[in-house]
Image (tube, helix red, strand yellow):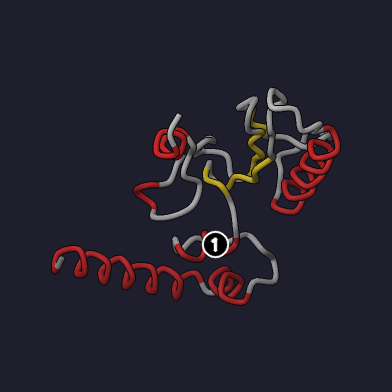
Amino acid sequence: MTDQTTTRLRPRLFGPADERTRPGYPDIEWSVWITGMDDIHELDEDGQPFDLLAALQFAAEYNAGAAADYDGHPYTPVIHAVVLHWGYAWSQKSEHAHGVDCGVQRCGPCSFDRDFPEVAAARKAARATAEEGASDAG
């Protein structure tokens, strides 16, 4: 396989909204995707839906175990646990870039938006109008 073919087969987890791959479900706020097996975990060990902290902890523990078990053999699959937010791969930076609440409790901009939803709605509408104007000009 060429690098170009390999690149095309990999999901694009981050980047512009119209190019991002959504490996998860759009109706589940927090989940963890296990690559390789293509398995989505929606509930924690207690059978409760994930919140951000529980999803990050689950993914960290899974990734640590997978790294410890990896033997370096070319036929051993490389598996990663990826936190998903509304089905998309989560990172605080990507959530902010897409104008979405990142879910981090102490995040300044997002906590302000949570406390003043009318201001957040006005800012989001202004951003959408500006993006439409930019796409019409291009």
Which residue is nearer to you in this view: 54 or 21?
21
- State which quadrant residue 118 falls in: bottom left
Which residue is nearer to you in this view: 10 or 90?
10
Which residue is nearer to you in this view: 3 or 65?
3
Q: Residue 129: percent from the left, percent from the top? A: 25, 69
In the image: residue 49, left or right of residue 89: right
Residue occupied by mark 1: 101
What residue is shown at x 26% (from left), y 72% (from top)?
130
Q: For the residue marked with disc 1, what is the amino acid?
A: Asp
Q: Residue 10: percent from the left, percent from the top? A: 49, 37
What residue is shown at x 39% (from left), y 74% (from top)?
123
In the image: residue 82, left or right of residue 13: right
Q: Is residue 58 above or below residue 96?
A: above
Q: Residue 75: percent from the left, percent from the top? A: 69, 23
**Kind of element beneath mark 1:** loop
In the image: residue 122, left or right of residue 22: left
In the image: residue 118, left or right of residue 43: left
Badge count = 1
What residue is shown at x 56% (from left), y 47% (from top)?
89
Q: Is residue 130 above or below residue 101?
A: below
- State which quadrant residue 136 falls in: bottom left
Which residue is nearer to you in this view: 88 or 127?
88
Q: Residue 14: percent from the left, percent from the top? A: 49, 52
What residue is shown at x 55% (from left), y 64% (from top)?
93
Few, some or many C-alpha atoms within 10 Å of disc 1 (few <14, some 14-19, many ≥20)?
Answer: some
- State which quadrant residue 122 falls in: bottom left
Q: Quadrant of the N terminus?
A: top left
Q: Residue furthest left?
A: 137
